[in-house]
Amino acid sequence: MELLTIGDMAARSGVAQSALRYYEREGLIRSTRTGGNQRRYERHELRRIAFIRIAQQVGVSLDEIREALAELPENRTPTKADWARLSARWRRKLEARIAMMERLRDQLTGCIGCGCLSLSRCKLINPEDRLAARGAGPQMIINPPA
Amino acid sequence: MELLTIGDMAARSGVAQSALRYYEREGLIRSTRTGGNQRRYERHELRRIAFIRIAQQVGVSLDEIREALAELPENRTPTKADWARLSARWRRKLEARIAMMERLRDQLTGCIGCGCLSLSRCKLINPEDRLAARGAGPQMIINPPA
DNA sequence: CTGCAAGTTAAAGTTCACTTCAACTCAAGG
DNA sequence: CCTTGAGTTGAAGTGAACTTTAACTTGCAG
């Protein structure tokens, strides 16, 4: 089996055929066509799909994912090094998001103690209004200083 | 200022008035009305809104948030203890999600080394197909054993 | 060959979480 | 009173990420 059909891809990736066609329309994955106009995928497209799903888990939009994938070479099969570069960049995004969730968790823990949870008044969430300039809401959590 | 107008609430919570009305239609927050049919909010509704936004950050749907909030008392102002219970439960959800992201990060780090990222073939992501019964996709990450 | 599962398309539909709009009413200062 | 800013409603619109549908074509086992 050299090239994979859309059915194969769906089975192997756990992503619906309709979603695969959608990803292709959106420029996230690519396929070649048979004489009869059916899609055939190279095996490495599975990696793109894996990357897409992982990024989605992190809460990234398809737009951003497309941008990231655009950094992979167009004319040759991406190498280990290509993927490594991309993965390293995403590891950073992932860690930023983990850090945010950890802040969130710590705030929530704090609030278990103080019983608070008021967006604008809780000093834990928005201490001393020093952050007012950055807009309303729980700024400490969403958009932390430094 | 006993009760807050929708404008006050929007200003204090950083959530648009239209969103507040939407939350109310969806049964996430409540208000009383003035003689002239305008909404008036008790201050503790701000806490609900804070909770909603925090939960959304964690990637929880409004449906699930509604269910969680439904555990708060209907007929009295929630106490510190009420909120503490809810917050404790959510801390657990939060930690589960953080754990997922950490697995994700570790897998991604692993994949920087091995250059892989193939959903069904990478042993790191889906070792030995032992997880096949739980469906396709990167099961180790999304839905880890135990 | 034939039959049928698997694939193709464009267009419309769906869900979520809101926002925008139009037309209207209310509240409060001068 | 009058004006003006704040609030009200239902209905329609938005954007993301897909799914569904209908009508049709391909690929391959028997």
Image (cartoon, coloured by chain):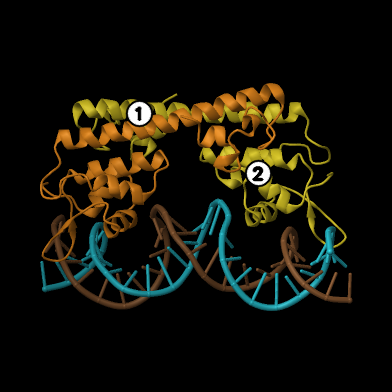
Chain colours: A orange, B yellow, C cyan, D brown
Seen from the viewer's position, the closer of residues B92 and B145 is B92
Q: State the residue at coordinates (56%, 36%).
A: A139
Residue A80: image quadrant is top left
Which residue carries the number 2 mark? B13
Which quadrant: the C terminus of chain B?
Answer: top left
Seen from the viewer's position, the closer of residues A12 and D1 is D1
Chain of the residue where label 1 is placed in the rendered structure: B
Tally the marks. Answer: 2
Task: Let me know if residue B144 appears in the view.
Answer: no
The reply, left or right, for residue B16 in relation to residue B5 is left
Mark 2: amino acid: Ser
The reply, left or right, for residue B83 in relation to residue B132 is right
| Real-space CA distance between mark 1 and mark 2, rounded to the nearest whole angstrom | 33 Å
The dot on residue B105 is 1
Seen from the viewer's position, the closer of residues D30 and B21 is B21
Q: State the residue at coordinates (64%, 34%).
A: A129
Mark 1: amino acid: Arg
> What is the secondary structure assignment of the residue under circle 2?
helix
Q: Is residue A30 above or below residue A83?
A: below
Are there few (<14), some (14-19), or many (20+) residues within 10 Å of tag 2? Answer: many
Q: Is residue A66 above or below residue B119?
A: below
> What is the secondary structure assignment of the residue under circle 1?
helix
